[in-house]
Image (cartoon, helix red, strand yellow):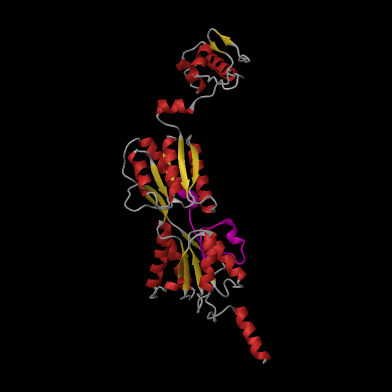
Amino acid sequence: MPKAEHRSRRSGIENETFHSPGLVVVVTIKDVAREAGVSVGTASQALRDSPVVRETTRRRVFAVSKRLRYQPSALARGLVTRRTHTVGLLISDISNPFFVRAVRAVEDVAQENGYNVILCNTDEDPSKEKRYLRVLVEKRVDGIILATTAGSLQAVRDVRWRRIPLVLFDRELPHVSIDTVKVDSVLGGRLATEHLLGLGHRRIAIIHGPVVRSTGAERLRGYLLALRAAGLRPEPALIREGNFKQDSGREMTRKLLELSPRPTALFCTNNLMTVGAMQTLHEQGVRIPTDLSLVGYDDMEWWTLTHPPLTTVGQPVYDLGREAMRLLLAQIEANSRRRPQRVILKPELLPRASCGPPAPMTVGAPRRRAGLARRTRASR
């Protein structure tokens, strides 16, 4: 068996690299201090660029640490400070551009304050959310930001019981007192519906998200409040529940177009369902806004590039992520229980060319089929 290729000194280990299979040597701050001829405290301060350490000593410690390839242990620091300077961020759909922008904001604020972010994607699956929460607890993260699926209430309560700082963002949980940052989704639903009502529409359809999610329920509530304020009774056939995914936007739009009379306007309550709706409308030859007016949710950069540009309800997404991380840092630094805070941001209606007055003829089959019937009768 070949001998380990290394050199040693009476004062300690000089070379941290061992080439024997299975043999690993970890260089510690004690090894650096011994080699540099200083105390462990002085070596630690020198590596942190503390001004109390003389420049000659600091250079000597740095030279030794470089030669030994010393890597500070985050785990060891965490055992001393009781912090790992990492936070967990759980989002429900990493393919959704809304969450991508929110993640960027969280990471920006985290980096500015010396924290790293562990990103977890739950895919709107409560079981994945529970597993990720358990993993983050085991990783001893300093705090967690959660866009909840609303299906892991007990897991959330367990995190709180362990006194791990937690912030809910974008979505709320009922009967739980936790720091929360969200956008006023009821107002967003009202803004979209009132805009269509103001253009003269009365048959306004909606594709909303799951009502078990606060955002799905609240945007639907805003729609219903606007209809009732206008003296209109909600029509069940015009209210369709999707799952915040593109495929559900496609399918629910197809079902709405089968109605007779058709809706004259459609409100989709998130960006992916809006994309799905636009695909179905294009496939079936429905012109926007001539045949049907369309309002989406979440203002994406490409909405101004669609034909026509899309009217949408914009959300301050970056502010949402930034405020969530700010609240989490406040919890971490407080290091004690404090009264939970609730930050509610305002959405904004962004009117563009995808909405107009209702078309004179909106009853029955698609226009291309009606035209074919007229040509058939004329030929007789």
Q: Is residue 377 among the parts visible in the rendering?
A: yes
Residue 317 located within the stretch drawn in magenta: yes
Q: Which residues are magenta?
A: 294-320
Query: Where residue 331 sits: x, y (%)?
Result: 37, 39
Residue 374, quarter of the rendered image: bottom right
Q: Is residue 81 left or right of residue 368?
A: left
Query: Where residue 226 sits: x, y (%)?
Result: 40, 69
Query: Where residue 365 sits: x, y (%)?
Result: 56, 79
Residue closest to the far right: 379
Residue 163 drawn above or below residue 72 = below
Placement of the C terminus among the 4 image quadrants: bottom right
Number of numbered discs present? 0
Residue 20 drawn above or below residue 196 = above
Query: Where residue 311 sits: x, y (%)?
Result: 53, 65
Q: Is residue 318 left or right of residue 2?
A: left
Residue at horizontal 49%, vertical 18%? 29
Residue 305 located within the stretch drawn in magenta: yes
Residue closest to the far front: 1
Residue 76 drawn above or below residue 375 = above
Placement of the N terminus among the 4 image quadrants: top right
Residue closest to the far top: 10
Residue closest to the far bottom: 380
Q: Nearer the viewer, residue 42 or 285?
A: 285
Q: Is residue 311 among the parts visible in the rendering?
A: no
